[in-house]
Structure formats: structure tokens, C-alpha cells
Image (spheres, coloured by chain):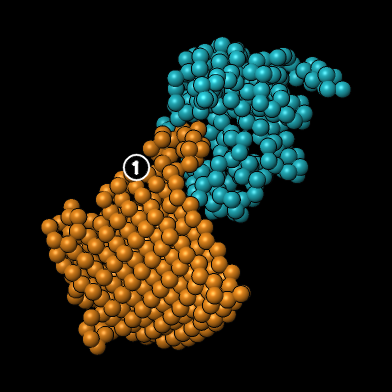
């Protein structure tokens, strides 16, 4: 499904070079839900952005088995091209748009490039229900600051679910939402795990309840993979270490 | 329908969104001449005695009626100044659809300066929709609308002003005077491209207590077009005023925003917000992660912004 080979990412600021990702290789199989965890600043979000094509790695290669089921090197593909190949990405901080309604955004998300068909409200309403929002209340709302953090997050997740992507990457889905929305979020992830089939999900997260749903946990520290293993074993180790 | 050619019919569709003769009262003006006019039981449409525009009288308690007064110019070099006066009776509730479309394929400037004055009676409510549109290869499509509103006690005016395409030069001036408890809401949408220039000037006088004004301007400046937004909300009593100017820059477009608040009463609460900048990178990124190309993402954002 997705293979990262010797990914490195550095930034140069005032002639000073900082290595954010030092050398990461990993392999994600179809049907797997993987949680990437680790301390703040360890490079997790950067890794998610590299997978989605938002950041280009300084070196290394990314291989992806796309919709056409052929493994290909996608290192140089743009965000748009990766999205069209079947990679979906959920923002940690959902983006706000003045004037773009929930309907507009989900319509874009649901429209596939091959078949430009009109999307009816029914499909959009279903998506909203799936993330616990009442469609009549939200369809015509603008995706702007009139929505709360929790509402924006649910709409963000709905836009990602709409893609029915082969690979979905969530960057800290729990960020900025209250405890009530959090329980709902866990429900959404449990359902995603159940319906995963041959697609894959990568979640950047610090939350135990999300890690519990994972098949595998990857611990990243200081730009490198510190440890990786099955979720239950990894959880015991991480918690043992913190005791 | 009156005898219109294709260009005229297209202009009419753009500015007034009509394909046929509308229900209710109307006046259609083509190159300075009225080519169709009708009054209704409650709305009287007649020429001003001076012959340079219309006098429109709306009877008190008229409910949910619409009056259309579109203007079309397709004679290159045609210049006109038109005065339209609206007298809106107490407790009336009406929608007024104005707008001007210019098609200019010649070498001379075509200019329409429309001066609209609204006398809005006690507790009356109006919605005023004004669209401006230009087409044709000439660079001389010029519109300078002036709107003056006098709002009596408890009245309400909602203005939708839209200029989306093709007008080369425009200076829009809107002035309002508000009496006891009256309210005004202005929504402006502006898109300029090429070498166009557009200026919007607002002067809102909140003369008496419990008045309120809300001006919301959204604009996009493309290519090398230039926009200027000037607003002044003057609070002379216990009142609330809010203006918001949001502009997106593209290419080498430029925008000057000059918002002013003039509070002359201790109980005047006036707020201004202004934001000018290019399309936020993260907005483009988000739409690209949903499979849109950069160009598709830009147009989705701009269309939503100006919707």
C-alpha cells in the first residue's frame, strides 16, 4: 500500500540546518490502521504532510499502490495527483473558508475526477450524519469561524471520509475538540476500523483511546522510529515507561 | 417581451436575472429611452417632471411586491445621467431590482451615472438589488452609481450591490441617513480584472437612537486592477455600526481600504474589520487534498467568497 524508504527532511533557517526527519522507512499494508505517536516536535506531523505531498522530502522515496493497483514512486507527485491516486489527508487545524458552505466543501470532496456527476444532498447528508451532525442545520452554513472547533473537526473528517481513499492520513484528529466531541470521534474511528476492507488508515495521535483501535503503533522520537509493534504490546511498553 | 436583440437580452439577463416581462411594476431603459413600463395597483412608475429619470411611488402597506428598473446601453459613446426617486410608503415591504448592463464595441466611452434616492417611510422594509455588468471589446464601460437613502423611524433597508464582470471604471457612492430605530444592511460583491478600477464610498449617518448599520464588502482584485474601499460610519446617537472589508488579491491586483469610524456620542458603538491578502495557502492545500488542481481550487475559493 504505502512504503516510505529512507525519508529525510531538513529545514535551513539562517544557514542553520535542522533535521526534522532523520531517516524513516516504513511499510503500511492494506487493511491496517496504524497510529504514529511520539513527543511533540518529534516529526510526526511533518511525516503526515510528506505522505500527503504537502511537504517534499529532502531525500528518500515514497511508493504507493494506487487505485490502478500498480506500485509506483509518488515522491514527485503533487498534492492533487496524490489525492487523485487515492491518498486522503485530514488537517490537524481544519481550514476555514469565507463563503464556502458545508455543502460546497463536501460536494468537492465527493466528486470523483473520473465521473463528474452532480452530487445530491442525500449523499452529503449521509456524510454529515456519519460524523454526528444534523444535515439540515449544517448544509448551508459557511465553513468559517461561525462554527465551533468541534463542528469544524467533524466537517473536516466528513470531507476526508467522502474521498473513500485507499489511504487516509489523520493528523492529530483529537486536537482542539472538547471531551464530548472526543467520545464521538472515537466512535467514528471504531466504525472506520470496522469498514476498512483493503484500505489503510494512518493516525497521528497521542490518545490512548485511539491507539487502542490501532493494529500497529509506531513511536517516533527525534525524527526517527524509536519502536514499532502491535498496539497492545506497544501500549504496555509506553505506559510502563511512563510509570 | 419588448423587441430586444440577443446582446440586449443577455445584458438584461445578467443585470436583472429576467428572461421575460416580470410580474408587477417595471421600467426598462435602453440607450436612454424607456422601452417598456408598467405600474401596478400599489406601485406607480412615472417619468420625473424634469424628464431625466423615474419617480416610483410605492403605496403604504404594499406587501411582497417587486419592481424592476434595469438599464441597458449598447450604443457606443452613449453617456447619460439618470435620477430615479423612490417614495416608499409606511409599512410597505418591497424588493427593487435595478442594475445596468453596458455592451460597448466601439471606441468611445459609454457612461451611465445613476442617482437613486430612496425615501423610506416609517416601518417600511426594502430590499434593493443592483447588479452591474459590462461586455464588449471596448475599454470604455463606465458606471458611476450614487445611492442615497433616507430611513424613517423603524424602517429597514437591505442593499445588495454586485459588480462581477466587465465594468472598466466605477465610482460607487452610497449615503444614508437613519432615524430612530431604523437599520441598514449593505452587502457588496466586487470582482475586478484587467485594467479595471473600482471605488466604493460609503457614508452612513446614524442620526438617532437605536439605529444600526452593517456594511459587508467582499472583493477580488485580479490582473492589474485597482480597488478602493472608503467607508465612514458616523454615530451621532445611541447606535451600532459595523463595517467589514475583505479583499482577495490575485496576480498584481491592488486594494486600498480606508475605513473610518466617527463616534460623536458616548453610546455609539462602532466596529471596523478589514483584511486584504492573497488566497490563504492552506485553503488551496485543503482543496487540493480533495483532488482539485490549484486553478480549480482558486476558482472554488473565489466563487464561494463572492457568492
Identify the residue shown where x is 50% and y is 67%: B261
Taking B286 as reference, is A183 left or right? Answer: right
**Residue B20 position within the rendered picture, expressed as x and y whole percent measured from the top left:** 29, 67
The quadrant where residue A205 appears? top right
Q: Residue at x 66, y 23 (%)?
A: A42
Q: Write down the residue under mark 1.
A: B251
Answer whether residue B20 is visible to the viewer in this image. Answer: no
* Up-down relation of residue A131 to residue A197 (above or below): below
Residue B60, quarter of picture: bottom left
Residue A86's place in the image compared with A116, above or below, is above
Rendering coords of residue B299 (x, y %): 39, 43
Circle 1 SS class: loop
Residue A170 location, quadrant: top right
State which chain is coloured cyan. A
Image x and y of residue B272, in percent:
52, 61
Chain B colour in the picture: orange
Q: Which of B169 and A199 is in front in this view?
A: B169
Measured from the top left, where is residue A103 in percent x and y? 52, 48
Residue at image position (19%, 59%) is: B140
Amino acid at each position: 500500500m504505502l512504503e516510505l524508504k529512507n525519508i529525510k527532511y531538513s529545514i535551513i533557517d539562517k544557514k542553520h540546518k535542522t533535521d526534522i526527519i532523520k531517516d524513516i522507512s516504513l511499510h503500511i499494508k492494506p487493511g491496517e490502521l496504524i497510529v504514529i505517536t511520539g513527543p511533540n516536535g518529534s516529526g510526526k506531523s511533518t511525516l503526515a504532510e510528506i505522505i500527503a505531498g504537502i511537504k517534499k522530502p529532502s531525500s528518500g522515496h515514497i511508493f504507493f499502490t494506487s487505485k490502478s493497483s500498480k506500485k509506483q514512486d509518488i515522491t514527485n507527485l503533487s498534492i492533487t495527483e496524490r489525492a487523485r491516486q487515492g491518498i486522503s489527508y485530514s488537517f490537524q487545524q481544519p481550514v476555514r473558508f469565507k463563503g464556502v458552505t458545508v455543502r460546497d466543501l463536501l460536494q468537492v470532496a465527493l466528486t470523483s475526477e473520473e465521473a463528474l456527476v452532480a452530487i445530491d444532498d442525500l449523499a452529503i447528508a449521509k456524510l454529515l450524519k456519519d460524523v454526528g451532525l444534523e444535515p439540515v442545520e449544517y448544509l448551508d452554513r459557511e465553513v468559517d469561524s461561525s462554527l465551533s472547533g468541534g463542528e469544524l473537526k467533524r466537517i473536516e473528517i466528513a470531507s476526508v471520509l467522502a474521498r473513500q481513499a485507499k489511504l487516509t492520513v489523520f493528523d492529530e484528529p483529537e486536537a482542539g475538540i472538547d471531551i464530548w466531541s472526543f467520545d464521538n470521534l472515537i466512535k467514528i474511528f471504531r466504525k472506520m476500523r470496522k469498514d476498512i476492507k483493503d484500505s489503510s488508515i494512518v493516525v497521528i495521535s497521542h490518545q490512548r483511546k485511539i491507539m487502542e483501535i490501532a493494529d500497529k503503533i509506531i513511536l517516533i522520537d527525534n525524527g526517527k522510529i524509536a519502536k514499532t509493534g502491535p498496539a497492545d504490546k506497544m501500549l504496555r511498553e509506553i505506559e510502563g515507561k511512563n510509570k | 417581451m419588448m423587441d430586444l436583440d440577443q446582446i440586449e437580452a443577455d445584458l438584461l439577463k445578467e443585470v436583472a436575472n429576467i428572461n421575460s416581462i416580470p410580474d408587477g411594476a417595471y421600467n426598462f431603459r435602453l440607450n436612454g429611452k424607456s422601452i417598456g413600463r408598467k405600474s401596478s395597483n400599489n406601485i406607480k412608475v412615472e417619468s420625473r417632471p424634469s424628464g431625466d429619470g423615474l419617480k416610483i411611488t410605492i403605496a403604504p402597506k404594499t406587501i411582497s411586491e417587486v419592481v424592476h428598473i434595469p438599464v441597458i446601453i449598447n450604443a457606443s459613446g452613449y453617456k447619460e445621467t439618470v435620477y430615479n426617486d423612490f417614495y416608499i410608503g409606511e409599512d410597505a415591504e418591497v424588493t427593487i431590482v435595478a442594475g445596468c448592463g453596458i455592451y460597448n464595441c466601439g471606441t468611445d466611452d459609454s457612461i451611465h451615472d445613476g442617482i437613486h434616492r430612496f425615501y423610506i417611510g416609517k416601518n417600511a422594509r426594502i430590499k434593493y438589488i443592483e447588479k452591474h455588468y459590462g461586455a464588449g471589446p471596448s475599454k470604455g464601460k463606465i458606471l458611476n452609481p450614487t445611492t442615497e437613502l433616507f430611513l424613517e423611524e423603524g424602517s429597514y433597508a437591505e442593499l445588495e450591490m454586485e459588480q462581477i464582470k466587465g465594468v472598466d471604471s466605477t465610482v460607487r457612492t452610497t449615503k444614508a441617513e437613519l432615524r430612530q430605530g431604523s437599520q441598514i444592511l449593505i452587502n457588496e460583491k466586487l470582482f475586478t480584472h484587467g485594467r479595471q478600477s473600482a471605488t466604493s464610498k460609503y457614508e452612513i449617518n446614524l442620526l438617532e437612537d437605536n439605529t444600526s448599520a452593517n456594511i459587508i464588502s467582499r472583493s477580488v482584485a485580479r490582473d492589474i486592477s485597482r480597488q478602493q474601499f472608503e467607508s465612514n460610519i458616523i454615530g451621532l446617537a445611541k447606535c451600532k455600526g459595523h463595517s467589514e472589508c475583505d479583499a482577495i488579491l490575485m496576480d498584481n491586483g491592488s486594494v486600498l481600504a480606508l475605513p473610518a469610524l466617527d463616534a460623536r456620542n458616548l453610546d455609539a458603538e462602532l466596529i471596523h474589520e478589514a483584511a486584504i491578502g492573497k488566497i490563504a495557502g492552506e485553503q488551496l492545500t485543503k482543496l487540493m487534498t480533495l483532488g482539485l488542481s490549484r486553478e480549480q481550487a482558486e476558482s472554488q475559493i473565489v466563487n464561494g467568497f463572492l457568492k
